[in-house]
Image: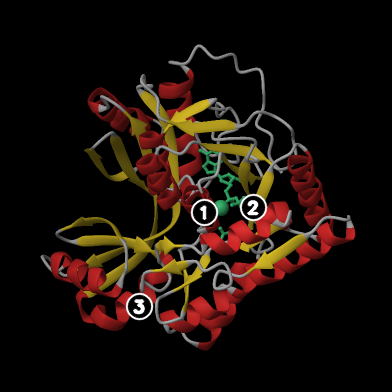
Amino acid sequence: MKNRLIVQKFGGTSVGSVDRIRAVAEQVIKTKEQGNQVVVVVSAMSGETNRLQGLAYEVDSVPSSRELDVILSAGEQVTIALLAMTLDKLGYKATSLTGWQAGIVTDDTHNQATIQSVDNEKFDQLLNDDQIVIVAGFQGVNQAGAITTLGRGGSDTSAVTLAGLLGANECQIFTDVDGVYSCDPRVVESALKLEHVDFDDMQTMAKYGAKVLHEPCVEFAAKHNLNIRVLSSFSPKQGTLVTRLQSKKNVCGLALQRDLSRLIVNLDKAGQIAMQCQLLGIAVHSQKAEYLIVNNSDVSKLLQISSEDVSIVEPISALTIVGAELEEVHLDVLPQLLAKDIKVLDSFRCDRVVKLLLLPEHLNRAANFIHAQYIEQSHSVAKDKKALIL
Ligand code: ADP
Ligand code: ASP
Ligand code: MG
C-alpha cells in the first residue's frame, strides 16, 4: 500500500531560531514515524525577509523587481539547510531543495508570481528513497530561469500548491497561533477560534488582511477542493480546517489592513492613475474620483510616475467585515462608531464585505467594538479559551 503524503509548512516564527528549527524537526519526525511520506515547506527565519527588503530599499526606493526577487528569496535558502542538517543529526534522511531545484516553475510576474508546475519525478525519487524533502517556500523560477517570488506571505501558497500538484493526502500549515480566529487574536483578545471556515470566507478574510493565510493559497485550495489545516507549531491542538461548508455564518469575521496609504489626487485623475498602477503591478485597494489607496510599499513607485497629480499622502487603515447579508450591519455600524468617537473616513459594501476606512489610531478600538457588537453577541460559543499566541 502506498504511504500517505503529507505536506507541512512552517512559517517564520516557527523557524525563528535554531531551537525552534529543532522543534520543527521533531514535529516532522513524528509525522514520518506515523508511516507518512513528508514534504516540508519552510519560510525564512522571522524578520529575515524584512531585513533583506530593507537592504534593497536602502539602495533604491524603487528596486528592480527581478533583483528584489533574487535578494528576497535568499532567506528561505538558509532555513531549508538548517532544517535538513537538524534532521540529519537526528538520524533521518533529508534533502533540501530551493525553488529551482524542486522544479517549481512560475509565470513571469516578479514579486507576485504564480506557480505553474513542479518536478514531480524529483519528488517521487526522493520520497521513494525514504527522504524527507524540504522545500524553500515563496520562490520559484520562470521559464527563462530567473528567480521569482510569490508575494509576501507566499510560503503558504508554495505548500498548498505543492500539495495539490503532488497529490498529497493532507496539507498542514503550522504557524504561531492555533488556528483561524474571527479576528486577529493579537488585536481582539476575545476573538473566537473557528473550528471550520469556508474557502470563500477564508479567501475574503485573507484578501482584506487576515495574514494567517496567503490569499492565493486559499484560491488554489478552493479550486482543487483541497482542505487546509491551520495549526500551531507549538501546541498539539486541533487547529482550524479550511474547507467547503454548506452553511455559513452571517458575520464570519473581521480583517484588518494597516500598511496602507491614501493618496489624494487632482479631481478625476484617480482613474487614470489606477490604470498606470495596473501596468506597474501596483495593487489599488480602493478608488474614488479624488483618491486611491495602495500599500505603503508601493507609494515611492507610484510617485515616480504621477507625483504632479498627487496632493496628499496619508497613512490609513481598513477594517473589513466579512459575512453575508451585511446591509443592516453597514447601516447600523456607522452611527455606532461615531458615538464612540471613531471617525469612518469612507465605507463600502459589496460581495459579502463591508469595508471601513479609518484613521490608523482608531483601528484596534474599532475592531474590538465591532467584534463585541456583531460577532460575540451572535455566537453562542462559550468564550472559555484564550487564543494561544506565541
Ligand atoms: P507565519 O509566519 O507562520 O506565516 P503569519 O505572521 O504570516 O505567520 O500569520 C500568522 C499571524 O496572522 C498571527 O500571528 C496573527 O497575528 C495574524 N492573523 C491575522 N488575522 C488572523 C485571524 N483571523 N486568525 C488568526 N491569525 C490571524
Ligand atoms: N519569507 C516570506 C515573507 O516573509 C514568505 C513567507 O514567510 O511566507 O513574506
Ligand atoms: Mg505567513
The amino acid sitting under disc 1 is Leu
The amino acid sitting under disc 3 is Lys
Q: Position of residue 206 (x, y in %)?
A: 43, 45
Residue that label 1 marks: 162
Mark 2: secondary structure: strand
Which quadrant holds the N terminus?
top right
Left or right for 208, reference 189: left
Mark closer to the chain start, 2 or 3? 2
Residue drawn at x 48%, y 62% is: 118
Residue that label 3 marks: 301
Alpha-carbon neighbours of circle 2 within 10 Å: few (<14), some, or many (≥20)?
A: many
Contact (CB < 8 A) between labels 2 and 1? yes
Q: How far apart are labels 3 and 1 at the CA level?
A: 33 Å
Mark 3: secondary structure: helix
Above or below, 200 against 19 in this view is: above
Mark 1: secondary structure: helix
Left or right for 389, reference 182: right
